[in-house]
Amino acid sequence: MEKLRKHIEEIIPITNEEFESIKPFFTIRKVLKNQYLIQQGDEAKYEYIIMSGIFRVFYLDEDGKEHIVQFATENWWMSDYIAYFNQKQANMYVVCMQPGEVLCLTLDGREKLSDTLHKMEHFFRIKLTKGFIALQQRVISLLSNNPQQRYEEFADLYPNLMQKIPKKYIAEYLGISRETLSRLYSNNK
């Protein structure tokens, strides 16, 4: 739980008493490689903050083709947010790519925490804003950048993930073929 405190304090200061009141809202869950936290059709009960591991958030189109929406690693938040915030069935999948540990937060818990500790409402707003900005930047990149530019941007933003995520998933995330990624990777060594 100390990782959670450190993560919160990157945005807002909290006292020991405040942190003790925050802790009960989160549950710890260990996750194995290839284990799903959310699958299409599930109730998206939780938003997750990653304490360790690497996760992939994706959806499957009608043809069964996987489309990666997000990779997530330590201190990142993830869920099927459409389902989570609307309390609907999930359309996304969240799968563990590298064994890890997450903290789980229900929507009800998030709302109660925000109501009882205004600082946490501020924290959640900042996290949501940063996530929205990152998502818009990703969409703009996919729409306007060529494969070389998308590759360089990903490598610059997430150098540690380049070594930890299989290349087929990076290619999928970037919207390019595995062969194109191999060529770009070789050209940038």
Image (cartoon, helix red, strand yellow):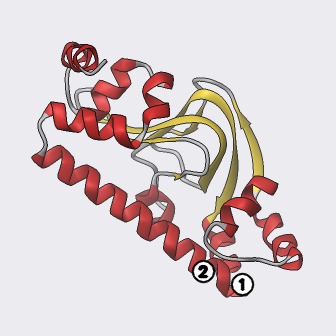
Q: Is residue 156 left or right of residue 42?
A: left
- Identity of the residue drawn at 31% across and 34% down: 173
Residue 84, compared with residue 109, is above or below; it is above
Which residue is labeled 2 in the image? 121
Amino acid bearing label 2: Glu
Percent coordinates x, y for residue 65 in the rendering: 27, 27
- Identity of the residue drawn at 77% across and 48% down: 28
Of the pair 84 and 13, the residue shown nearer to us: 13
Q: Is residue 74 visible?
A: yes
Residue furthest to the front: 189
**Image marks 2 and 1: residues in contact by CB distance under 8 Å:** yes
Percent coordinates x, y for residue 15 in the rendering: 83, 78
Helix, strand or loop at label 2? It is helix
State which quarter of the image contains the N terminus.
Answer: bottom right
Q: Quadrant of residue 57?
A: top left
- Identity of the residue drawn at 33% across and 56% down: 135
Which residue is labeled 1 in the image? 117
Q: Quadrant of residue 16?
A: bottom right
Percent coordinates x, y for residue 8 in the rendering: 67, 66
Q: Rounded to the nearest whole Å, what is the CA distance between mark 2 and mark 1?
A: 7 Å
Q: Residues within 10 Å of mark 1 (few under 14, many from 20)?
A: some
Helix, strand or loop at label 1? It is loop
Amino acid bearing label 1: Leu
Q: Residues within 10 Å of mark 2 (few under 14, many from 20)?
A: some
- Identity of the residue drawn at 66% across and 87% down: 118
Q: Is residue 155 left or right of residue 102?
A: left
Residue 77, compared with residue 112, is above or below; it is above
Percent coordinates x, y for residue 56 in the rendering: 47, 36
Of the pair 84 and 128, the residue shown nearer to us: 128
Q: Is residue 178 left or right of residue 155?
A: left
